[in-house]
Each structure stands twice: as structure tokens, then as C-alpha cells.
Image: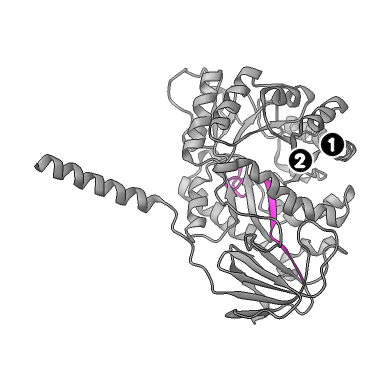
């Protein structure tokens, strides 16, 4: 009997520990009324007439041109524009501010604090949601969800899965040869990247990310700019290796994305069942047609600036020049074939570049109208997030101002549909920032 009591006691203790590890529900504000606002709903390229929007708890409860009551707080928009919070579909939560060396070898506690500071800055730029495309972001996500840290919603991928010498393999030559089944490298121990050189290894690493809470899984199917031993033209994973990750993700009801610049990397990814291509700047006409025909997502970035090359070596600078040279072409092909295109920034190792997050979105007007660009960064990006299915950490509608949608909202001083440059100065022009029905900034209250 004493053994039974002991086991029961252990069960209770385990249950308490498990419950304490779960994110605590965020404390919700009372009902809030946005009065006299013109709405950009995230879909239509025109503003609404003067409207009133009632937010209760986490959701938009009512939108009306008539009077609305039952609110504890009223924000007089005075004709300003109310729009959805912005979404960045390619963000690296843990890798924005540290140097490459600090990210790999620096103190983990400090790096997490650095990432938390950047998360707050990201939200204050009006980006209420980010899709993290690689890095140990699970802890920061939990801290944000539990209101310990102010920051955006994070859709985490977990560690980037790469092959030996692939993009994301930041080991030194002195770390070779790799012992199969031996000690993990520093980058693997901290959850930045995981090396996988067979379908079985890929399957294990993908399942590990899903076990930790990944909403999608990321592999690098070809070379990249920042990795020292990864030429752009190299294709990395074999089709069976990519398919192993796709099968693992599919079993969990979610999807795989691949970092892929070249036609070979793109086409092999699609053959394996990958549902979203990241970058694609070196794609050809045949690859663009295939993406469109198969209904694959293209998550790409307006790389136009070579200033990021300042901290790179000569080989990496040359790779960046190739990518920047392909930017016009990738957007031209995306428009020509009506590819489902998402917006992201892919900022690495530069607080200064992160501060230009809104400017990178505004740069889309090189190819799109302001309304098209803002739609891409709101409802279109939200549609991509929906591919995570039951692994979606934030069920509900994002990226739109509609009744029943999650209340991620920006009140903007000026009309970004007329002048998208307004979003380049969020400190001045985003007068209210709301995420999940809670106000994180309100300059009108002063």
C-alpha cells in the first residue's frame, strides 16, 4: 500500500511539474473600442469609411459604422488608419543582434537576453508575428507567451537542419572528421543547427524539432551566403533525405520549408514534397513554372542592399552580390506566374539592419503597389502560417481586421496605402500597437 501511495505521490508531483511548464494564459485587457477609424482590412486595397471596432479579450468582436458601446476604454482614432499587425515570414529571433562568433561561442544566457531585447524592438516596429526560420527560439517564445517578455508571436522552426558542409554548418575544419553518433558540436548543443547526413538522421532531427514545439521544419537544400563552406551553386540534401523530413512533418500535420536559391535545389525540394521555398533568387523560368503549377509557396526577400557585406569575407561578399543581382528576377517571375509569395526580411547579425525592417517592406513597391505589399505582409503571410495546421501555436485568424479575428492591430498616423514610407518610421507613425487584444503602445494616451 505504501508503494501505491508513493507512486500516486510521484504522479501528482509529475502532473504539477508538467502543468507548471505549460505557458500561462495571458492576462487580457477589458473591452477596448477604436472609434472613428478607417480600416485597411489586410485584403482590400481601399480603406473603409469611418468605422468603430470593438475588441474584447483577444478578438475583434464587432466592426460597425454605427455606435458601439460596452467598452471600458475608448481610443479616438480621429480618422486614422487601423490595420492588421505586420508579419515577417523569415525572421531569426536569436540571430539578429549577436555577431556570428557570439551566436556560436557566446554565453547562452546573455544571447537570450539580447534576443529578448530585440523581440521587444520587433513588436515596437509593428511586427506582431514572426515565423522563425532557424535557431533556438523555443524558450523566448514561451517567455513571450507567458508575458515575461514583450515581443511578437513566434512560429518556431527550431534548429536548422543541414548536411555536413551545407548552409547552416558553422563548424570549423578543426571539428572534422565528424564521428557518427559521437559528441555534438557547439552549434548543435545550443540548438542553432543540426547536421544530418542520411534519411534516418534527417528523420531524427526533424522529429526532435517537432517534439520541442516546432510549427514547421526547415532544411537547407542548397548553398548560402553566410556559411563559410557552402558555395551557392551546391545542392545538399538528396531527395530521399528531404522526403524523410517531409514524412516526419506530415505525420505531425505540418510542413517543411527549404532554403533554396538554385533551380536544382528548388526542383528537388518540390519533388520531395516541400511546400515552401525560401529565397529562390537564382531560380529559372522552369522552376518558377513548377512552383506555380504545384501550388508551392515562395517566401522571398527584397535583397537590394550590399551594405550587409561589410562584415563578410570576400567569398561571402561575392555570394551576396549574386543573390542581390537575382532579386529583380525572382519578383518578376513571381508576378509573371502568380506564385503565392510571402514577405520576409532574413536579417542576421545586425541590429542596424533590423531597425530597417519596415523599410524592407516598403521596398516591395519596386514591384508591387503599396496595397499589394501590405497585403503580402498581413493576410498573405497569415495564410502561409496556416500551413502548420494542428501545430499552429496561435489558432485563430491573423493578418486581417475582421470580426472574430485575433486582435493584432496598428493604429497609423497617415495612410500607408497612399504613402507606404509611413511604416519606415514606426516610432512616430504607429501610435497604437496591439497584440492579442492588449495594448503595448499608445501615444494617444499622453
Q: Which residue carries the number 1 mark? A: 330
Q: Is any part of residue 283 visible from this angle? A: no
Q: Position of residue 38 (x, y in %)?
A: 79, 71
Distance between mark 1 and mark 2 Cα atoms = 8 Å
Q: Position of residue 328 (x, y in %)?
A: 88, 40
Question: Looking at the image, is 318 positioned above or below residue 363?
Answer: above
Q: Which residue carries the number 2 mark? A: 300
Along the line of sight, the residue nearer the viewer: 118 or 350: 118
Along the line of sight, the residue nearer the viewer: 94 or 238: 238
Q: Where's the N terminus, which quadrant? A: top left
Q: Is any part of residue 316 visible from this angle? A: yes
Total residue callouts: 2
Q: Position of residue 446 (x, y in %)?
A: 64, 82
For the point 76% across and 61% down, the residue is: 41
131 relative to 65 in the view: left or right: left
Q: Is residue 349 magenta?
A: no
Quadrant hosting residue 355: bottom right
Q: Position of residue 183 (x, y in %)?
A: 43, 25
Residue span colored magenta:
81-99
Along the line of sight, the residue nearer the viewer: 215 or 175: 215
Q: Is residue 90 magenta?
A: yes
- How many neighbours does mark 2 have within 10 angstroms: few (below 14), some (14-19), or many (20 or more)? many
Question: Looking at the image, is 389 positioned above or below residue 412?
Answer: above
Secondary structure of the residue carrying tag 1 is helix
Question: Looking at the image, is 266 positioned above or below residue 65?
Answer: above
| CB atoms of marks 1 and 2 within 8 Å | yes
380 relative to 388 in the view: left or right: right
Extreme residue in the left direction: 1
Question: Looking at the image, is 103 positioned above or below residue 374?
Answer: above
For the point 83% across and 68% down, the residue is: 415
Amino acid at each position: 500500500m505504501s508503494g501505491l501511495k508513493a507512486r500516486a505521490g510521484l504522479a501528482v508531483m509529475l502532473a504539477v511539474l508538467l502543468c507548471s511548464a505549460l505557458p500561462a494564459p495571458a492576462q487580457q485587457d477589458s473591452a477596448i473600442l477604436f472609434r472613428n477609424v478607417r480600416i485597411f482590412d489586410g485584403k482590400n486595397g481601399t480603406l473603409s469609411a469611418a468605422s468603430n471596432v470593438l475588441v474584447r479579450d483577444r478578438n475583434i468582436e464587432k466592426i460597425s459604422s454605427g455606435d458601439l458601446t460596452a467598452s471600458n476604454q475608448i481610443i479616438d482614432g480621429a480618422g486614422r488608419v487601423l490595420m492588421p499587425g505586420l508579419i515577417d515570414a523569415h525572421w531569426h529571433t536569436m540571430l539578429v543582434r549577436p555577431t556570428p562568433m557570439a551566436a556560436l561561442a557566446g554565453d547562452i544566457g546573455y544571447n537570450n537576453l539580447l534576443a529578448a531585447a530585440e523581440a521587444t524592438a520587433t513588436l515596437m516596429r509593428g511586427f506582431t508575428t514572426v515565423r522563425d526560420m532557424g535557431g533556438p527560439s523555443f524558450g523566448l517564445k514561451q517567455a513571450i507567451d507567458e508575458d515575461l517578455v514583450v515581443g511578437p508571436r513566434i512560429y518556431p522552426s527550431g534548429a536548422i537542419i543541414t548536411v555536413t558542409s551545407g548552409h547552416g554548418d558553422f563548424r570549423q575544419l578543426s571539428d572534422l572528421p565528424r564521428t557518427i553518433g559521437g559528441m555534438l558540436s557547439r552549434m548543435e548543443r545550443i540548438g542553432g543547427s543540426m547536421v544530418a547526413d542520411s534519411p534516418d538522421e534527417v528523420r531524427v532531427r526533424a522529429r526532435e524539432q517537432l517534439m520541442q514545439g516546432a510549427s514547421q521544419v526547415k532544411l537547407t537544400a542548397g548553398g548560402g551566403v553566410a556559411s563559410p563552406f557552402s558555395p551557392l551553386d551546391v545542392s545538399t540534401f538528396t531527395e530521399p533525405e528531404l522526403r524523410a523530413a517531409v514524412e516526419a512533418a506530415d505525420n505531425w500535420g505540418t510542413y517543411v520549408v527549404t532554403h533554396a536559391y538554385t533551380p536544382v535545389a528548388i526542383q528537388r525540394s518540390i519533388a520531395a514534397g516541400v511546400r515552401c521555398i525560401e529565397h529562390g533568387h537564382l531560380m529559372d523560368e522552369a522552376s518558377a513554372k513548377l512552383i506555380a503549377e504545384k501550388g508551392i509557396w515562395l517566401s522571398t526577400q527584397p535583397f537590394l542592399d550590399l551594405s550587409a557585406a561589410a562584415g563578410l569575407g570576400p567569398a561571402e561578399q561575392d555570394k551576396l552580390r549574386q543573390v542581390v543581382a537575382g532579386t529583380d528576377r525572382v519578383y518578376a517571375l513571381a508576378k509573371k506566374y502568380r506564385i503565392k509569395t510571402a514577405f520576409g526580411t532574413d536579417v542576421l547579425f545586425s541590429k542596424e539592419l533590423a531597425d530597417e525592417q519596415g523599410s524592407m517592406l516598403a521596398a516591395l513597391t519596386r514591384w508591387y503597389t503599396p496595397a499589394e505589399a501590405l497585403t503580402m505582409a498581413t493576410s498573405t503571410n497569415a495564410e502561409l502560417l496556416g500551413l502548420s495546421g494542428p501545430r499552429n501555436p496561435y489558432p485563430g485568424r491573423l493578418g486581417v481586421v475582421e470580426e472574430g479575428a485575433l486582435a493584432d492591430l496598428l493604429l497609423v498616423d497617415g495612410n500607408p496605402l497612399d504613402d507606404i514610407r509611413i511604416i519606415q518610421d514606426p516610432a512616430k507613425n504607429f501610435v497604437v500597437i496591439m497584440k492579442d487584444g492588449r495594448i503595448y503602445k499608445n501615444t494617444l494616451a499622453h
